[in-house]
C-alpha cells in the first residue's frame, strides 16, 4: 500500500497550516521538491495497484517507495516539531531567522540529500530490473478466483437455514399474476450461500416443466460477454460461429429466446455495467420469463429490477451453524443421532465460523478427515485460506481508495457499532480520502460516497439509516473483519494489540503508523514505536500510556474509549500533540490543558463522559487561539470564559455544550450567534433559576439539528424562537406542561421529531389535520403521564416511521389508519389495556396500515396477554404485517 503512504504525505504537505509554516521557516524549495517527486512515483504506484501487478520485483520496488515517502514525512515533521509547529504568523516570522532555524534548516537539508540519494537508487533499480512499465491486465485482478462455468452440483447437506428463502423465491418465480420478464436478485458477500441457494432453485425447476428452458451461467469477476452468450447458445442447442463480437452474439441469443418462457440464472454478477450489457440478450415477451441473479452488489440488484426487493442472505444462527457443521463432518452418520459428547465440541467449532456457511463447510471438510480424538488444538491450526481467498475477491475488486478505507475498519472491536459520522471524520484525518482540487464535492461528501459503495458491495452491514437515507450506524461482520485485519497486517497498514505482554508491542516496526489496542489490561507504561506513530486508538478498561510523550508528538488521530469508573486527570501531555486532527475521549477524564488549543490542525474534538457525575471538562482556549479548521466541538462544560471564546472557532458545524449552574447566558447566546456555519447543536445540563436566559435561535439559518436535554423553560425558549430551517428536533427532560404540537407543527421543514424521557408531562397530544406535512419520523419515549394520543385524519401525511415506547398510561390505540405512508411501527412496553385494545375492537387500525415491521417488547417476567395463543391469533389476522417480534 505504498500509494497510501504517498497520498498521505502529499495531502499533509498540501495542508494550509503545515505548508504555510514550512514556507515561512524557509524550506519551501525542499517542500516543493518532495511534492514533485512524490507525485511522479504516486502515478506509477497507483498504476501498479490498478493493474493488480503482483510480481516480486514490483512488490519490492513499491515497498521501497513507501519507505521513502515515510522518510520525507519524518524529515519534514521533525523540522516542524523542532521549530514549534504551526503558530501565528508573527511568531513564525520572528523565529524563522534565528540561529535555531539555521541549524534546523541545515539538518533538514542533510536529510533531504539522503532521501535524494535513496530515490536515485530506487529509480536506477526500476530501470536495471526492467520495472519501466506495467503490463495491462484484463478487467479485474490478474489473479482471480475463477468460478466454474457449468451448473454446480450442490451437496444437499449444504442447504441449511435457507429453506424459507428458497421456498419464497420459487413462489415468486412461479407467480402467474406477473407476466412481465422480472428479475429476482440474491444479494450477499462471498461465502454467504448465494450460489447454493440459486443452484437448489435451478435444480428444482430443471426437473419440472414450468419453463421452456432453464439455463445456468456463471458470470464471475473475469466478465466476458461473448463467452457467456456462447454458453447460453450451447445450452439452447444452437450452433454459432466461433468468431464474432458482442454485436453478433447478443442478437443471436435474443432471437433464440424469443417466444420462449425461460429461466436464466446468472451467478455472481459483479457490476451494474455487466448487467446492462447482459440485459440486452433477454427478450421481454410478457410470457412469465424470469432471471435469477446472484451478486455481491446491492447496486446490481437495484438496477436489474427496481420492483422486486432483493433477497439478502443472513448468516446462520447457532442451531443452523451446528447442524451444517455436523452434516459436513459426519455425512454418513448424520441420519442417526450423533454422540452426545461430540455436540459441545462441535458447538465450540461452529462459533468460530460466525454463521458463515462457507467457513462451516471448509471446517466440516477438515474435521471429517480426522478422528474426533485428534481434534484438540485443531481449531488454531485450521487454514482458512480457501475461505478467505473466496471472500477476498470482493476486496481485490475494490478501487484503490476503498481498499484503504476497508482495511481501516479493522481498528474497531468485534461487533462494534460504528457511527458513520465518526468513521468519515477518521478517514479524513488519516489522509485516506482522495480529493481532487477541481472537485466541487467536500471531503466529507467523498468519504460518505466511499462508505455507501462499501455497503453496496456487502462488505459492511448497515444497522440504521437517517431520515434522509444516509448511513447512521454500521458494523462489519466477523469474518469480513478477519479479512480486513489480514489485509491490514499484510500491508503494514495497522498494528493490533490485545494482549498484556510486552512482546506484542515489540513486534511493531519503526514504520508502524497506526496502533489499535483492544482491552489492553496492563496499567504500566509501554514503549511505543519511536516517532513514527500517527494514530493511536484505544478500546478497553485502561488508558494505555507511553513512557515517552515525545513518541506521540506527530499523532494525527487519538481515539480513547475507556469504559471504567476510574477518573483520569493527567492530560498535560496533550499539549505536545501539535499535529492532532481528530481527538475523541469516551470515559471519565479531568480537564484538558489550555495549551491544548494551540494546535491549529484540530478538526474534531469530542469529550464524551461515561459518568454524568464527572462530566469531561474542556477549558476555554487562550485569547490568541483561532482554530479555523475546527469543525466539531462536543463536551464543553460551559463557564463564563466560554461565553466569549466560541468565536475562536468560526467554522464550527457541530457543537455540544453542557450548562452547569451559573452561566452568563447572554454572553453565551451572543457568542454562539457568530458561528455562521453551525449545523448541529446539542444543549444539555441544568441552570439555576436566577441564571435563566432566553435562547433565541431564529437567526440560525443553517442550523438543521437541535437536541435540548434540559428544561426548556429554563432556557426561556418559546417554540416560535426555533430555527426556521430546522430538520431534526429532539427534546429530552424538557418537562413541558402544555401540548407543544400546535407550535411545532408550524416548522415546515421538520423531518424528525423525538420526545424522550419526561420531555412532556401532560396527558394529551394532538397531531392535527394538515400539521407536520414533512415529518417522516416520530419517536415518543418515556412520556409517563400521557393518556391520549390523538391523530387526526390528514395529520403527518408523510410519516413513515413511528415509535411509541414506555407510555404506560396510554390505553387506547391511536388512529394509525390515518397514517397512510407509515412503513414501520414500533410499539414497546405499553400497558395491558393497550395490547388488549389492539387485539380487540381497534384491530382495524393496524390492518389498514402498509406497515412492514411491528415489534412487541414486554418487560421481563410479565405477560400483557392472558395466553400466548393470543399472539398467534393476532399475527394470523394481521396479514399486512411482515413480522411480529415478541421479546
Image (spheres, rainbow, N blue to C red):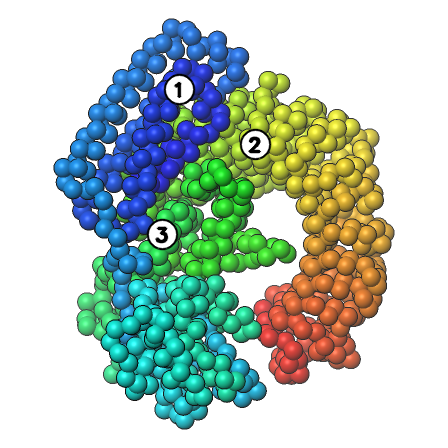
Q: Nearer the viewer, residue 134 or 467?
A: 134
Image coordinates of residue 692 in percent, x first then y, are 80, 33
Question: Which residue position is annotated with label 1?
Answer: 28
Which tag, 1 or 3, sits closer to the chain's start? Answer: 1
Q: How many marks?
A: 3
Image coordinates of residue 696 in percent, x first then y, are 79, 37
Question: Which residue appears at 48% of the width and 52% of the height?
Answer: 451
Which tag, 2 or 3, sits closer to the chain's start? Answer: 3
Q: Is residue 237 left or right of residue 438?
A: left
Q: Nearer the viewer, mark 2 or mark 3?
A: 2
Q: Is residue 747 left or right of residue 727?
A: right
Q: Nearer the viewer, mark 1 or mark 2?
A: 1
Between the C-alphas of marks 1 and 2, the distance is 26 Å
Answer with the quarter of the image where residue 556 lies.
top left
Observer able to see residue 856: no
Disc number for residue 630: 2
Question: Which residue position is annotated with label 3?
Answer: 484
Cβ atoms at labels 1 and 2 below 8 Å apart: no
On-image quarter of the C terminus: bottom right
Between the C-alphas of marks 2 and 3, the distance is 30 Å
Q: Residue furthest top?
A: 99
Q: Nearer the viewer, mark 1 or mark 3?
A: 1
Amino acid at each position: 500500500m505504498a500509494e497510501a503512504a504517498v497520498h498521505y504525505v502529499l495531502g499533509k504537505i498540501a495542508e494550509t497550516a503545515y505548508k504555510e509554516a514550512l514556507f515561512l521557516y524557509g524550506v519551501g524549495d525542499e517542500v516543493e521538491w518532495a511534492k514533485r517527486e512524490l507525485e511522479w512515483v504516486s502515478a506509477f504506484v497507483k498504476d501498479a495497484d490498478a493493474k493488480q501487478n503482483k510480481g516480486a520485483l514490483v512488490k519490492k520496488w513499491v515497498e521501497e517507495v513507501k519507505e521513502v515517502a515515510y522518510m520525507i514525512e519524518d524529515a519534514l515533521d521533525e523540522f516542524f516539531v523542532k521549530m514549534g509547529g504551526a503558530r501565528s504568523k508573527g511568531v513564525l516570522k520572528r523565529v524563522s531567522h534565528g540561529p535555531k532555524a539555521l541549524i534546523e534548516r541545515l539538518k533538514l537539508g542533510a536529510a533531504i540529500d539522503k532521501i535524494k540519494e535513496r530515490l536515485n537508487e530506487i529509480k536506477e533499480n526500476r530501470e536495471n530490473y526492467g520495472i519501466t512499465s506495467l503490463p495491462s491486465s484484463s478487467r479485474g485482478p490478474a489473479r482471480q478466483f475463477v468460478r466454474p462455468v457449468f451448473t454446480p452440483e450442490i451437496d444437499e447437506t449444504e442447504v441449511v437455514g435457507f429453506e424459507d428463502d428458497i421456498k419464497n423465491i420459487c413462489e415468486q418465480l412461479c407467480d402467474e399474476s406477473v407476466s412481465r420478464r422480472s428479475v429476482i436478485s440474491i444479494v450477499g458477500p462471498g461465502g454467504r450461500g448465494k450460489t447454493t441457494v440459486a443452484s437448489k432453485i435451478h435444480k428444482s425447476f430443471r426437473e419440472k416443466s414450468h419453463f421452456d428452458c432453464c439455463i445456468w451461467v456463471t458470470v464471475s469477476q473475469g466478465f466476458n460477454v461473448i463467452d457467456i452468450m456462447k454458453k447460453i447458445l450451447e445450452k439452447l442447442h444452437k450452433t454459432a460461429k466461433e468468431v464474432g463480437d458482442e454485436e453478433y452474439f447478443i442478437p443471436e441469443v435474443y432471437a433464440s429466446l424469443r417466444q420462449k418462457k425461460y429461466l436464466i440464472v446468472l451467478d455472481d454478477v459483479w457490476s451494474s455495467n455487466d448487467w446492462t450489457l447482459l440485459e440486452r440478450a433477454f427478450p421481454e415477451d410478457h410470457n412469465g420469463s424470469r432471471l435469477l441473479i446472484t451478486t455481491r452488489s446491492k447496486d446490481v440488484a437495484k438496477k436489474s429490477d427496481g420492483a422486486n426487493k432483493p433477497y439478502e442472505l443472513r448468516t446462520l444462527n447457532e442451531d443452523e451453524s451446528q447442524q451444517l457443521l455436523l452434516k459436513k463432518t459426519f455425512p454418513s452418520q448424520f441420519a442417526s443421532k450423533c454422540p452426545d459428547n461430540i455436540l459441545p465440541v462441535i458447538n465450540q467449532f461452529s462459533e468460530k465460523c460466525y454463521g458463515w456457511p462457507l467457513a462451516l463447510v471448509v471446517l466440516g471438510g477438515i474435521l471429517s478427515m480426522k478422528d474426533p480424538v485428534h481434534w484438540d488444538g485443531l481449531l488454531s491450526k485450521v487454514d482458512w485460506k480457501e475461505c478467505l481467498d473466496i471472500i477476498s475477491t470482493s476486496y481485490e475488486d475494490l478501487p484503490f481508495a476503498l481498499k484503504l478505507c476497508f482495511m481501516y475498519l479493522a481498528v474497531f472491536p468485534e461487533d462494534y457499532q460504528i457511527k458513520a459520522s465518526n468513521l468519515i471524520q477518521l478517514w479524513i484525518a488519516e489522509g485516506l480520502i482522495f480529493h481532487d482540487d477541481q472537485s466541487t464535492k467536500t471531503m466529507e461528501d467523498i468519504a460518505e460516497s466511499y462508505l455507501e459503495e462499501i455497503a453496496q458491495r456487502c462488505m459492511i452491514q448497515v444497522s440504521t439509516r437517517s431520515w434522509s437515507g444516509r448511513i447512521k450506524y454500521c458494523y462489519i461482520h466477523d469474518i469480513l473483519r478477519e479479512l480486513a485485519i489480514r489485509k491490514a497486517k499484510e500491508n503494514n497498514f495497522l498494528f493490533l494489540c490485545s494482549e498484556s505482554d510486552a512482546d506484542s508491542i515489540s513486534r511493531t516496526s519503526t514504520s508502524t503508523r497506526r496502533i489499535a489496542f483492544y482491552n489492553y489490561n496492563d496499567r504500566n507504561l509501554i514503549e511505543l514505536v519511536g516517532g513514527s506513530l500517527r494514530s493511536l486508538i484505544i478500546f478497553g478498561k485502561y488508558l494505555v500510556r507511553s513512557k515517552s510523550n515525545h513518541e506521540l508528538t506527530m499523532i494525527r488521530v487519538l481515539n480513547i474509549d475507556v469504559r471504567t469508573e476510574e477518573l483520569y486527570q493527567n492530560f498535560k501531555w496533550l499539549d505536545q500533540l501539535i499535529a492532532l486532527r481528530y481527538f475523541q475521549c469516551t470515559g471519565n477524564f479531568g480537564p484538558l490543558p489550555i495549551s491544548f488549543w494551540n494546535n491549529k490542525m484540530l478538526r474534531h474534538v469530542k469529550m464524551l463522559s461515561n459518568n454524568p457525575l464527572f462530566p469531561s471538562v474542556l477549558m476555554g482556549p487562550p485569547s490568541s487561539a483561532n482554530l479555523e479548521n475546527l469543525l466539531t466541538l462536543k463536551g464543553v462544560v460551559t463557564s463564563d470564559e466560554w461565553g466569549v471564546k466560541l468565536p475562536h472557532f468560526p467554522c464550527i458545524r457541530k457543537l455540544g455544550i453542557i450548562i452547569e449552574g451559573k452561566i452568563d447566558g447572554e454572553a453565551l447566546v451572543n457568542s454562539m450567534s457568530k458561528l455562521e456555519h453551525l449545523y448541529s447543536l446539542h444543549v444539555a445540563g441544568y441552570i439555576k433559576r436566577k441564571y435563566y436566559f432566553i435562547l433565541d435561535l431564529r437567526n440560525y439559518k443553517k442550523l438543521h439539528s437541535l437536541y435540548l436535554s434540559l428544561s426548556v423553560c429554563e432556557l426561556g425558549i418559546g417554540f416560535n424562537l426555533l430555527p426556521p430551517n430546522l430538520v431534526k428536533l429532539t427534546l429530552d427532560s424538557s418537562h413541558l406542561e402544555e401540548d407543544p404540537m400546535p407550535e411545532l407543527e408550524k416548522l415546515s421543514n421538520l423531518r424528525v421529531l423525538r420526545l424522550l424521557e419526561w420531555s412532556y408531562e401532560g396527558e394529551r397530544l394532538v397531531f392535527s389535520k394538515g400539521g407536520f406535512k414533512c415529518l417522516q419520523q416520530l419517536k415518543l419515549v418515556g412520556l409517563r403521564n400521557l393518556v391520549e394520543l390523538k391523530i387526526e385524519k390528514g395529520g403527518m401525511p408523510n410519516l413513515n416511521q413511528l415509535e411509541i415506547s414506555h407510555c404506560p398510561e396510554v390505553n387506547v390505540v391511536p388512529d394509525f389508519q390515518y397514517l397512510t405512508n407509515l412503513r414501520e411501527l414500533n410499539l414497546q412496553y405499553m400497558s395491558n389495556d393497550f395490547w388488549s385494545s389492539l387485539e380487540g375492537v381497534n384491530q382495524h387500525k393496524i390492518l389498514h396500515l402498509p406497515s412492514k415491521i411491528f415489534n412487541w417488547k414486554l418487560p421481563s417476567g410479565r405477560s400483557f396477554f392472558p395466553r400466548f395463543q393470543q399472539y398467534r391469533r393476532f399475527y394470523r389476522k394481521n396479514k399486512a404485517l411482515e413480522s411480529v417480534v415478541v421479546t
